[in-house]
Amino acid sequence: MNLSYMKPTAMRIRLISTLIGIALSINLSALTYDIETIEIRPEHNIDVIPFITENSASEEILIIETPDVDQLKKQIRGLNNEPIRRVKIFRYSPSGWRLHLSKDLEDSMDLIDTVRTPKGIELVGYQNSQLLYLNKTTRNFEKLLESPSVFSGVSWGSSPLVNMFVDLNNDGLDDFLIPSFEGWQIALQTNVGFRPLQTLGPLPSMTFSESALYTAYRAEEAFLLDENTDGLKDIAFWKDGSFSVYRQNNQGGFSPLKNILDVNLKDMLSGYSQISVGENVDNNKGKTRLLDDVLDLNNDGYSDLIVKRIKAEGIFGWESEYEIYLGRPTADNRLEFLGVPSSVVRTDGFQFNNEHLDLSGDGNQEFVITSVDISIGAVIRVLISRSVSVDISIYRMANGHFPDKPNVKKNISARFDFGSGELFVPAVLGADITGDGQKDLLVQKGDNTLLVYPGQRGLTMFAPKPIKLKLKLPKSQTGFIVSDLNNDGRDELILKRKEDGEIKLSVVRFKN
């Protein structure tokens, strides 16, 4: 009689693994949540900003309200005296979210943002070429600095939320960066306020209608990179295969003289370019290269280039690929990019979203791409099923390279509205909602289901099977905000959605 034999050590390892798997299964299947409602005015559009810091004693959420009515409707409804915009700060307490501060904005306040200062996060507004901050004690806006910009005038029904700040010198304080008619306005922040303004870079381009009654200005995009590898962020502007770089110095400013960083990619388009497909469209012989982004993908301290190449051969011949050019220092300590890409990330079909996120926690940025097949076969399937197959692909960098095929690929069915021609594009988020220090993958499925793939170590990155949560979800990714509101190491979801024509705002807290 033959008996199978297992070594005691192997048996113990398998038993332990089984018990761990059971424990994980129990914990993950027991993932629960609470939903907290924030009462807002339903006839208003809103922008939402988590209004907290690591040292915050309380949870706060900033709301910017804009009436969802045009001027004629305001007159008909007798709302002429209602302010165009209003800011509100909600604070969390054991009894729920309560209104802490409400402030009407003047019509001339064009922009709103938040800024990190030595006192914490401040609400700031841009009005009449002045940067103002909201004094929470007096509830009045007070002057921070003066600066001209291309932003001016009253815009009905649109949000004033614009990113005006970035930490340029890694001191934990946000610095001022905004385009003007003379170039870009820059001011570094110190512990006692902002330094004097500097103006750098190219002038904005202008377009106008034939009647010259409509004029629009577009500023050239400002990129941040370390051109002379001294550890300080420099400001760069892209044109015709090279960057014009203004170096940051140790005196709290930037050199007014530009340095040229040649990238040797002469066939790449500069600035904003619109790509058309269809008949009688050249599209650079069907191939167009665009500078997609500049960032440190592999966490080595040197900026890298992401170049997007689009191949469009008619409506049904759409392909995209990303060329990765890693940055490295030269012998004289200047940044350079290799002439050939270190990796090429290819996708078929039309891309909706392209994000760079550190989902694995190793310091490298993953590619997260949401795309849809627009082949003839896909169109036929849409006509039959009234739905579209959406691919979510995640590419993880290893040893400075991205793989040819995605490490993680998820496919979901998204609806297509033939009446409006609107395609529902699901939200894809990275958030630690299980509280284990590992990013989880959150994928929206329709209006009422959130798929949670728990994060795990290794190349697979996430559990193969999701946890299904029933939630009322927004119809677009812009309605999702991930934030650890109470600094407990577990992310919350802030959801902004429309239901029966009204805006609803809620906070989802996860727990085991």
Image (cartoon, rainbow, N blue to C red):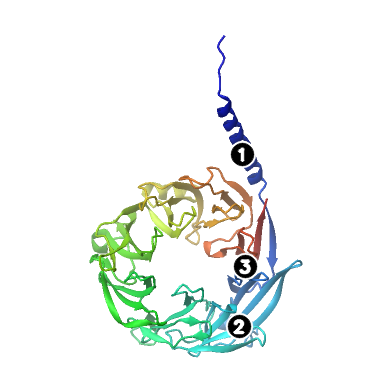
The crowding category of the residue bearing disc 3, from other C-alpha atoms within 10 Å (few below 14, some 14 to 19, many at least 20), is few
Q: Is residue 376 left or right of residue 22?
A: left
* Residue at image coords 70%, 75%: 99
| Pick the front one: 188 or 132 | 188
Residue 501 tag number = 3
Q: CA distance from mark 1 to mark 2?
A: 61 Å
Identify the mark nearer the N-term, 1 or 2: 1
Could you say whether the residue bearing mark 2 is in a helix, strand or loop? Answer: helix
The crowding category of the residue bearing disc 1, from other C-alpha atoms within 10 Å (few below 14, some 14 to 19, many at least 20), is few
Could you say whether the residue bearing mark 1 is in a helix, strand or loop? Answer: helix
Q: CA distance from mark 2 to mark 3?
A: 17 Å
Amino acid on which the number 2 mark rests in the picture: Lys
Q: Is residue 205 left or right of residue 159?
A: left
Residue 20 tag number = 1
* Residue at image coords 61%, 48%: 468
Residue 131 tag number = none
Q: Locate residue 224, reporting x and y percent.
A: 38, 71
The furthest residue to the top? 1
Identify the mark nearer the N-term, 2 or 3: 2
Q: How many marks?
A: 3
In this rendering, the answer to whether 467 lies above or below 314 is above
Q: Locate residue 451, reporting x and y percent.
A: 57, 50
